[in-house]
Amino acid sequence: MTELNVALIGHLFMGKAHSNAYRQVSRFFDTKLKFRMKVLCGKACTDELEATARKYGWEESDCEWERVVARPDIDVVDISTPGYLHHPIALRAAQAGKHIICEKPLANTLAEAKEMLRAVEKAGVKHYVNYCYRRVPAVAFAKRLIEEGRLGEIYRYHGSYLQDWIMDPEFPLVWRLEKKYAGSGALGDIAAHATDMSQYLNSDVAEVAGALTTFIKERPRPADPSGAWGSKAAGTKKGRVTVDDDACFLAHFKNKSIGVFQATRFAGGRRNYHAFEIHGSKGSLAWNMEQCNELQFFDRTEPSVRQGFKTILVTEAEHPYVRAWWPPGHIIGYEHPFVHAFYDFLTCIEEDRVPEPSFRDGTKVQAVLDAVERSAKSRRWERVRV
């Protein structure tokens, strides 16, 4: 087999990002296996879906995910749908023996995530959760510095994910604002990224103390309910917001370090501010996605007269993934980590390894989110139950 036939389920925001990555991965990275963009599956069989499939480079379109997953010519099922569909699609895909790529968070609940993990491990298929920020070169380089011991013993981790896209009270009640579709709000949508990043760079989370807040309780429903997944046109009828607008929590990690996390879609001026700051006995690191090519590094082992944060522009060929792209100093952007993720996915299939982050990693994140929800209700520290 030299090609893997892919079915992408979901054609809006993530569908666009994933489609671009499938087109680019083997053009910039040397791979024995290649993706074949076989089927794009959307919510309804419309001229729009067919046109989107042609535009993005897919051979076919379909609106029945059950039919697509059952096809014998499909090797990989990519789940880029709203969260409530992750669980049934993943179970059906695993039973059909398909490799699975799934958008984050893995599921809407911890119970669903655990069932999905059992299903893929029983089926023996490859499984990957798209916490793609792990594959930003600056982040991967930070991981390398930590593994080399440049930070020493880690004392403190600060993770943030701040956005501002729903601050207008007239912004409609899209699916991300309804628990039955999204599972949670800022917690699952973006705090999940911050959580995965912390467990990748630092350690698994042991316990949390959290708070969840909803600032705007009601919003206008979309003018066109059939287009609710992507519609931003507000109608006249109101609906209740059933998820959090803001998630904050403290954490104790298993390596005895402490963590402070904040995630909100109400941070005016922050468009996509995914950030971390890590403090250790020998040094510190800081990064944010809005300046994604730059890593801030403080080396405490230097003489005090030379100490201070320095900016590393992570664009050298020796930096992770960069060799495939442009000359030093020529930056990359949001779309590139998706390409890196799919390159690693192909490599793992070639070498018969489970990609990371896997459904097991995704379940660990889900366990943290579950503990934050329990803590917000109990107003106590809650253990993470993996």
Image (cartoon, grey):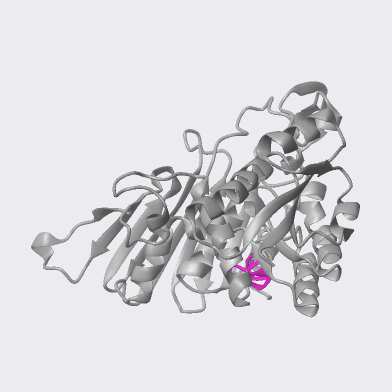
Percent x, y of residue 1: 69, 67
Residue 47 within the magenta-colored segment of the rendering = no
Residue at 47% across, 65% down: 259
| Residue range of the region highlighted in magenta in the rendering | 356-365
* Between 321 and 31, the one nearer to me in the picture: 31
Q: Does residue 377 appear in the picture of this structure?
A: no
Residue at 52% across, 51% down: 27
* Between 142 and 70, the one nearer to me in the picture: 70
Residue at the limit of the structure toward the left, as seen here: 305
Q: Does residue 289 appear in the picture of this structure?
A: yes
Which quadrant of the figure has residue 69? bottom right
Residue at 54% across, 74% down: 204
Residue at the limit of the structure toward the front, as seen here: 2
Percent x, y of residue 87: 81, 61
Percent x, y of residue 125: 74, 73
Name the chief secondary structure element in magenta: helix
